[in-house]
Image (cartoon, helix red, strand yellow):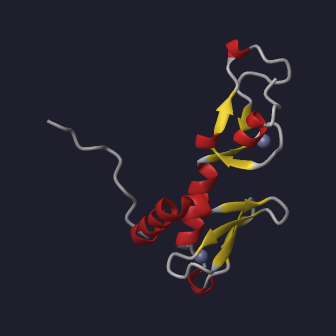
Amino acid sequence: MIEKSLAQPAHQSTTRIERGRDLYTEHADEIRFDEVDKVWLVPSQHEATSVYEVALGRRGESCECADFEYRGESCKHIVAATLARAKSTTCSCCGKRVPWKFVTEVQEDDGLLSWFPGDVLCSDCVCGGFWA
Ligand SMILES: [Zn+2]
Ligand SMILES: [Zn+2]
């Protein structure tokens, strides 16, 4: 018999969170972090050509979409960007934001000169020979 999880979903805005999760699931590979403007670029779920700029700053979150503008609450793009941020990290070498699944974490027994255990390197840096 499987016990029910104790974690119950929050009651408020469950649908927006679910839509954000769907958006993330469907477009995870297209969500990018703009290093220059420090914003997340989240594609629109329905129009392939639209991209929303989402800011996840210390002063709060914001999105360009009408939903956020009118309600001032976290929209699905903010939810998707928050997920993308949680599932990505910064490469210890080039400083680019990369999804965790595409980085290699330096292990204690790798014996590398330039990196400490726990440093993470993106595939570009690993393949580019910075892994030494
Ligand atoms: Zn939005
Ligand atoms: Zn890198």
Is residue 91 left or right of 74 when viewed as pictured? Answer: right
For the question of whether residue 51 can be seen, the reply is yes
In this rendering, the answer to whether 107 lies above or below 79 is above
In this rendering, the answer to whether 17 lies above or below 95 is below
Picture coordinates of residue 128 (x, y %)? Answer: 80, 37
Ligand 1 in which quarter:
bottom right
For the question of whether residue 12 can be seen, the reply is no
Is residue 14 left or right of 126 when viewed as pictured? Answer: left
Along the line of sight, which residue is nearer the eye, 26 or 123? 123
Along the line of sight, which residue is nearer the eye, 104 or 74? 104
Write down the quadrant of residue 32 in the picture.
Answer: bottom right
Is residue 32 left or right of 93 when viewed as pictured? Answer: left
Q: Residue at x 49, y 67 (%)?
A: 23
Is residue 105 left or right of 125 when viewed as pictured? Answer: left
Q: Quadrant of the C terminus?
A: top right
Along the line of sight, which residue is nearer the eye, 10 or 47? 47
Q: Quadrant of the N terminus?
A: top left
Q: Residue at x 59, y 67 (%)?
A: 78
Picture coordinates of residue 60 (x, y %)? Answer: 70, 65
Q: Residue at x 57, y 76 (%)?
A: 44
